[in-house]
Amino acid sequence: MARTAHVDTFVRDNQPPPEQWPELRFDLPELQYPGRLNCAAELLDRLVESGHGERVALRAPGTALSYRQLLALANRIAHVLREDMGLVPGNRVLLRGPNNPMMAACWLAVLKAGGIAVATMPLLRASELKAIIDKAHATLALCDARLAEELRLAQAQCPQLGRIVLFNGEEAGGVEALAAGKPDTFDNVDTAAEDIALIAFTSGTTGQPKGTLHSHRDLIASCDCFPRSILKHGPEDIFCGTPPIAFTFGLGGLLTFPLRFGASTVLMERLLPDSMLQTIQDFKATICFTAPTFWRQMAGLAKDYDLSSLKKCVSAGEALPDATRQLWKQATGIEIIDGIGSTEMSHIFISHTPEKVRRGATGYAIPGYQARIVDDQGRPLPPGTVGRLAVKGPTGCRYLADERQKNYVQDGWNLTGDAYLMDADGYFFYQARTDDMIISAGYNIAGPEVENALLGHPAVVECAVIGVPDEERGQLVKAFIVLRPGFEGTPALVKELQDFVKAAIAPYKYPRAVEFMTELPKTETGKLQRFRLRENHR
Ligand code: 3UK
């Protein structure tokens, strides 16, 4: 491996051993990269050097930052990280904020300074932040002032987390104030292409978060796959969408993809279906990234907005029902681009151009990636057979210090945990998750984590949380609860339990359906039989 720029080697020391890595393949001319690569320098310095300086990079309500301005801002924050916060290359920097220009500038600054960005979902609570801080051994944090409270609570229990500096606030010691006195230029840290740039956290089936590692090269390679062969965007395009930058779907779709090609991106906090449509209209957006439930809800509202600027619509995060695809097409005339990606793979690896859509299919392996269906032993299955999806390409799964590496990567292939079938033409059809992960409205929710939260309530003896089919959300979080004697399963108690969960973990994980039982189905050895609960909902 090339000489690392990391002085702090915590992440390198906790990577999986080489024999557990996926095979990385760089099969296209555009995927040949030099040994030294800094992702943020590629996305900012290179664009300004090549004449894009005066074009708008970021847009937000009342704000537009040109490439030159964004570069200067990121450079000043990189100085703050290095000089005021003592960042040493390889340090993990926790980032917490909704999608807005300062969050994006901070992310770019961390990479410029050779740090490792650990962006977190805005809705996470202290206990979830603590798990991430501990796992990533984050020593510094940049946080939106409006979200500081839960991070401060987490910090009280995380001695390794030293300094938190706030942005978008009024503080004299905030990021903006510190950055104001810094130079507009910065000597980017000369990172190796393979140096880790990012740890993206994803919930496992056990609810223990998994930290997926991505190098500077991985992030650039993602920009050179899906965008080049499927999206085919250019400098005139204006991106928008809902996924947080903390989720690699949002990071690519709303930050790295547009910047790679000199386009501009609209960063909005907390979008709902109607405000998403309003945003497309107001900013004359041409490309929108969101999840199937949003496309479905937006289809019903589309007629009230001027969406004439919109050209391309990307759906990912969960399976896109054909009915949703058709509703959106009827409403706008636009064929949605479906794509499956994962936090482990960084971004989308199976998708299709609008012209090559096939009803019910997610698409084909996009140029740069290979995909196949395998049996439980990893042997390829013939077309038309349901099996496990296996993929490989220029990016792949590496978990930070995690036994589950062996589940995701086998024989050099990445196993996404999805059951799929491939037809004779190489189109892939989604069947189901092969594990117990609940995917509701585009969010991954681990049942056991919700169970843990419920078990903290005095009324709960036992519980099981599963995903049940739901038209709106794909799946709905449902809890089966056995009550302690003396408690009654009233609507008031349901509400109380739901509020209890919302206060313990991110609110979107709460059980929207609750059923009280006298006992839960178990095996003789005492293991919970989730599949039996699930059977009753088919
Ligand atoms: C499911 C899909 C069917 C599938 C993601 C695009 O969703 C992303 O990452 P996650 O780690 O979840 C990965 C899992 O989600 N899934 C995603 N997209 C589809 N299932 N059709 C789809 N189009 O189970 C997959 O294994 O949260 C998506 C880009 C980056 C991402 N991180």
Image (tube, rainbow, N blue to C red):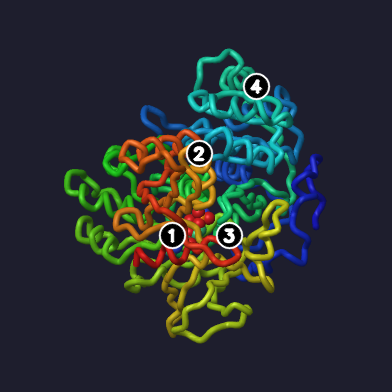
Q: Work out whether mark 2 precedes mark 3 in sequence or the reverse, and give the earlier one.
A: 3
Report the residue marked by disc 4: 182
* In the foreground, 402 or 505: 505
Mark 1 → mark 2, Cα distance in angstroms: 39 Å
- The image shows residue 376 at horizontal and vertical percentages of 59, 77
Q: Nearer the viewer, mark 1 or mark 2?
A: 2
Q: Residue at x 51, y 52 (%)?
A: 446
Q: Label 4 CB, ligand 1: below 8 Å?
A: no
Q: Identify the amino acid type marked 1.
A: Lys
Disc 1 under 8 Å from ligand 1? The reply is no
Q: Is residue 516 left or right of residue 43?
A: left
Residue sitting farthest toward the front: 486
Residue 448 - label = none
- Residue 63 appears in which quarter of the rendering? top left
Judged from the image, the secondary structure of the residue bearing numbered disc 3 is loop
Q: Which residue is mark 3?
A: 345
Compared to residue 144, the image places residue 90 above or below, namely below
Task: Determine whether the beta carbon of the residue marked 3 sits less than 8 angstroms from the nearest atom of ligand 1.
Answer: yes
With respect to residue 63, does 377 lie above or below? Answer: below
Residue type beneath disc 4: Lys
Mark 1 closeness class: few <14, some 14–19, many ≥20 residues within 10 Å: few
Residue tagged by mark 1? 232
Q: Is residue 194 visible?
A: yes
Q: Earlier in the sequence, mark 1 or mark 4?
A: 4
Above or below, 388 relative to 222: below
Picture coordinates of residue 208, whole percent (x, y): 61, 49
Residue depicted at 51% across the width and 40% down the height: 121
Q: Nearer the viewer, mark 4 or mark 3?
A: 3
Q: Please tell me how crowded label 4 is: few (under 14), some (14-19), or many (20+) other residues with Cα within 10 Å.
A: some
**What's the CA distance linking mark 4 and mark 2?**
38 Å
Query: Can you tell which quarter of the image residue 496 is in?
Result: top left
Marks 2 and 3 in Cβ contact (< 8 Å): no
